[in-house]
Amino acid sequence: MSHIPQIKIPATYMRGGTSKGVFFRLEDLPASAQQPGPARDHLLQRVIGSPDPYAKHTDGMGGATSSTSKCVIISPSSKPDHDVDYLYGQVSIDTDFVDWSGNCGNLSTGASAFALHAGYVDPARVPENGTCVVRIWQANINKTIIAHVPVSNGQVQETGDFELDGVTFPAAEIVLEFIDPADEGEGEGGGAMFPTGNLVDELDVPGVGKLQVTMITAGIPAVFVNAADIGYTGAELQPVINEDKAALAKLEAIRVTGALRMGLIKSAEEALKRQHTPKVAFVAPPQDYLSSGNKQIHAADIDLNARAMSMGKLHHAMMGTASVAIATAAAVPGTLVNLAAGGGQRDAVRFGHPSGTLRVGAAVALVDGQWTVTKAVMSRSARILMEGWVRVPGDAF
């Protein structure tokens, strides 16, 4: 009896920010997976170990969480004045799909480092020692990301003393600039940062009732709600939400209703295949709490508390793209995020999340009656964990 052997594909396993994923060069993928479609999706699913009804990813590279079920494809950029195209796939853990609807802000850091490791950046622009500016085209949402990557002895510097809450060990700091991060082309606002034209809307959520929300498309489409309005303090850690089926159902209902109102989906059923976006998050004024890593967070050191859902579960820290949305909304007077932070105008915000705190800057302006954001800035880090080949059965895609 003959059997189809496994094939091996060059790959790099990287951490970026508080996420990690399997990185590929486009040209290293099998020919059938070098373009969008079922072959590509099935290949990435098999690499990660999805769909897995046991939700463990025992037979793949995934970590059975939204932060560790990710794949990235990098290629020389098709856009002028950019170094690489960066395409991100959020692989569902237990259902049969890959979500391509948004970016991963954390793995944007990994994309910049990988671009240098892979030799995609003109060597003439890479200093022997210093900082290399890597210009990334984010192909999921058609946006520019500028990364400032430290270089030592002509190579990406990965070790350092920069500490990021949610990551166990320090590393070298990479500064990311998300240029014009408001999403385009979806929703009733025709690409406006606030899709409905309002800073605050009322949603009538089935099974929950009427809620005040702020819906924004900066970094990633997001729906913000006051923690107190849904029975929370804003200082919750993962077990409080993720072990409560009623809580998960309530937050998913808010997400789906928000997605419909934002025009991201046309029916509630479509949300099953669009779990990555929009994000739903709840916010509250600053308060003391003990982080998941037993770090005491003091209200005096933060502007607000924020908790965000990712792929149906409370995130262990904060997604990079959601951080952009938080900072942008906080900078606009009158949004729920801004009010939770005390109101007024600001160009940066430090918020508390389950693992600790994060500071993000955002530059906003009111232009012709509409709020716009020109740039959001945050610091992350990235590190190669393993490189070589991944192996998948030859009939898996």
Image (cartoon, rainbow, N blue to C red):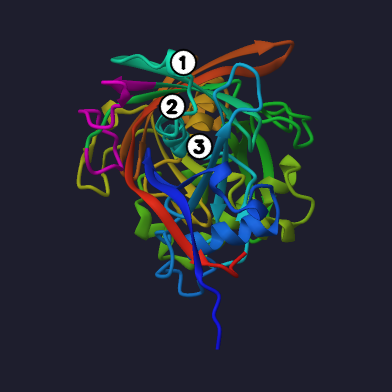
Q: Which residue in the structure is indicated by mark 2?
A: 341
Could you give the CA–CA distance between mark 3 and mark 2, rounded to whole angstroms?
16 Å
Q: Which quarter of the picture shows residue 219? A: top right
Residue 146 on image: x %, y %: 50, 21
Q: Is residue 43 left or right of residue 186?
A: left
Question: In percent of the image, x 43 and y 66: which residue is there?
Answer: 57
Give the label on residue 322, or none: 3
The boundaries of the magenta stretch are 149-169
Q: Which residue is mark 1?
A: 346
Identity, as a three-letter code, of the amino acid under mark 2: Ala
Of 252 and 120, the residue lying toward us:
120
Q: Position of residue 89 (x, y in %)?
A: 57, 48
Image coords of residue 198 (percent x, y) = 70, 29
Who's the residue at 27% across and 49% down the image?
292
Where disc 3 sits, the SS reads helix
Few, some or many residues within 10 Å of mark 2 (<14, 14–19, 20+): many
- Precedes in sequence: disc 1 or disc 3: 3
